């Protein structure tokens, strides 16, 4: 049971991780920027995404679906390439 961590120690470990990786500084800067905006943006989340460099207005579910379709196509293409290579190898050995 030496691996047991209390919830408080887990929180502290996570906080140190966020601080070390620069997440806390980045979030602080974006929130300060949002606070200092003369006019509040209509969508604060989009403002934060733009500030951090993330694209906005993208349908993530559509991209995930397309990604899965492409993975399936790649799998089929690899299967076809393997079959063609096998056929070529057999034709050369005859």
Image (cartoon, rainbow, N blue to C red):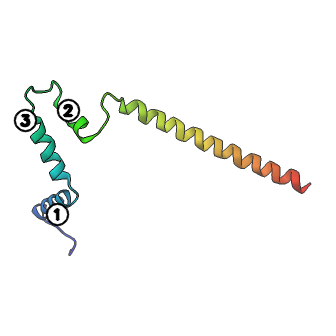
Query: Closer to us: mark 3 or mark 2?
Result: 3
In front of the other: 18 or 1: 18
Left or right: where 77 falls relative to 63: right
Q: Residues within 10 Å of mark 1 (few under 14, many from 20)?
A: few
Q: Residues within 10 Å of mark 3 (few under 14, many from 20)?
A: few
Residue placed at 24% from the left, 36% from the top? 49
Residue tagged by mark 3? 36
Question: For numbered disc 2, what is the local secondary structure?
Answer: helix
Does residue 28 lie above or below 60 as drawn?
A: below
Residue tagged by mark 2? 47
In front of the other: 92 or 40: 40
Quadrant where the N terminus sits is bottom left
Residue tagged by mark 1? 13
Residue 32, position in %: x, y? 9, 41
Earlier sequence position, callout 3 versus callout 2: 3
Residue at the far right in the pictured view: 94
Earlier sequence position, callout 2 versus callout 1: 1
In front of the other: 75 or 26: 26
Residue 44, position in %: x, y? 16, 31
Question: For numbered disc 3, what is the local secondary structure?
Answer: helix
């Amino acid at each position: 049971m030496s691996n047991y961590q209390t919830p408080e120690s887990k929180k502290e470990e996570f906080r140190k991780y966020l601080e070390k990786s620069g997440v806390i500084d980045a979030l602080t800067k974006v929130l300060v920027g949002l606070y200092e905006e003369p006019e509040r943006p209509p969508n604060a989340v989009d403002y934060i995404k733009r500030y951090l460099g993330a694209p906005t207005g993208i349908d993530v579910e559509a991209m995930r679906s397309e990604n899965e379709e492409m993975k399936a196509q790649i799998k089929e293409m690899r299967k076809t390439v393997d079959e063609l290579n096998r056929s070529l190898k057999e034709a050369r050995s005859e």
